[in-house]
């Protein structure tokens, strides 16, 4: 379901396939290779919903039989994965929008303050994209997402959409307190964060599970 209005700020995408994939993602027994594939599948379905309002323009073409008129995307689109977990969503969305630009933002959460720390930013000095799709599997405190949105607004991006697998109520509120126009596309909203600021019930650390680094190694 979505908030009132097709362009409302919160879109909770309800679909049997998403719910099926989400259950496997939550399961602690799901192995990294399957977890990565599930993240990609969910990313595709979220991106499909998030791009329904992209503008198009007529494009005359020749089929093998006749001349006709098709449609082409009119707006420039940028994919902005928040490192590192957001990398798990990039290829799937890029398959849908192969002409999209990809720009990276590196943010990590300080364990003591739970606040985001920026360690990498790669944005051009050229004109900003028309639409930015921020990719991050988890929206917990909302700190990293809010920092990403602030960076993109400073670049001049007019329309920002956040694609996330699971969000907390607190994280959604934090993003919209900073920027009420950001559209959030999510499969489900979990009620709370634990003392370590992980979403509950959540799925654990998405980055660790994507990159198979959830076990302590010598």
Image (spheres, rainbow, N blue to C red):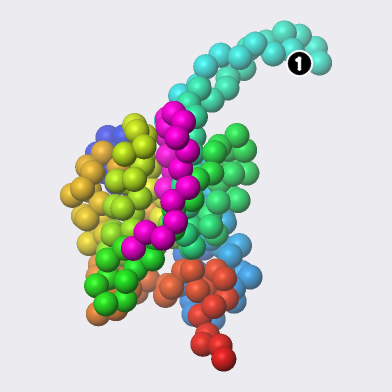
Residue 112 vertical placement versus 127 (above, below): below
Q: Position of residue 23 (x, y in %)?
A: 47, 69
| Residue at the top extreme of this rendering | 67
Q: Decide: few, some or many residues near mark 1? Use Cα within 10 Å; few <14, some 14-19, many ≥20.
A: few
Q: Residue at x 54, y 38 (%)?
A: 101
The C terminus - image quarter: bottom right
Q: Is residue 122 magenta?
A: yes
**Residue 182's image quarter?**
top left
Q: How many marks?
A: 1
Q: Position of residue 155 (x, y in %)?
A: 36, 37
According to the picture, the residue beneath numbered tag 1 turns out to be 63
Residue 216 vertical placement versus 101 (above, below): below
Mark yes or no: residue 135 visible: no
Residue 113 vertical placement versus 78 (above, below): below
Of 118 and 87, the residue lying toward us:
118
Q: Position of residue 87 (x, y in %)?
A: 53, 57
Q: Position of residue 3 (x, y in %)?
A: 26, 43
Of 111 and 158, the residue lying toward us:
111
Q: Residue at x 42, y 32 (%)?
A: 128
| Residue at the bottom extreme of this rendering | 218
Secondary element at image label 1 = loop
Mark yes or no: residue 192 visible: yes
Of 161 and 121, the residue lying toward us:
121
Stretch of the chain drawn in magenta = 117-134
């Amino acid at each position: 379901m979505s908030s009132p209005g097709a362009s409302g700020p919160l879109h909770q995408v309800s679909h049997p396939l998403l719910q099926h994939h989400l259950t496997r993602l939550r399961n602690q027994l799901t192995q990294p290779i399957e977890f990565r594939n599930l993240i990609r599948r969910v990313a595709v379905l979220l991106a499909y919903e998030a791009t329904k309002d992209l503008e198009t323009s007529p494009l005359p073409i020749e089929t093998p039989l006749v001349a006709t008129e098709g449609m082409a995307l009119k707006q420039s689109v940028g994919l902005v994965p928040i490192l590192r977990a957001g990398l798990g969503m990039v290829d799937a969305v890029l398959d849908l929008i192969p002409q999209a630009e990809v720009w990276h933002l590196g943010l990590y959460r300080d364990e003591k303050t739970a606040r985001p720390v920026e360690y990498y930013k790669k944005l051009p000095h050229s004109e900003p994209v028309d639409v930015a799709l921020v990719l991050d599997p988890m929206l917990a405190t909302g700190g990293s997402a809010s920092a990403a949105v602030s960076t993109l607004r400073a670049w001049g991006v007019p329309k920002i959409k956040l694609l996330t697998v699971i969000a907390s109520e607190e994280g959604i509120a934090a993003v919209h307190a900073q920027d009420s126009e950001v559209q959030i596309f999510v499969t489900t909203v979990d009620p709370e964060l634990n003392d370590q600021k992980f979403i509950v019930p959540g799925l654990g650390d998405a980055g660790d599970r994507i990159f198979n680094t959830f076990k302590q190694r010598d």
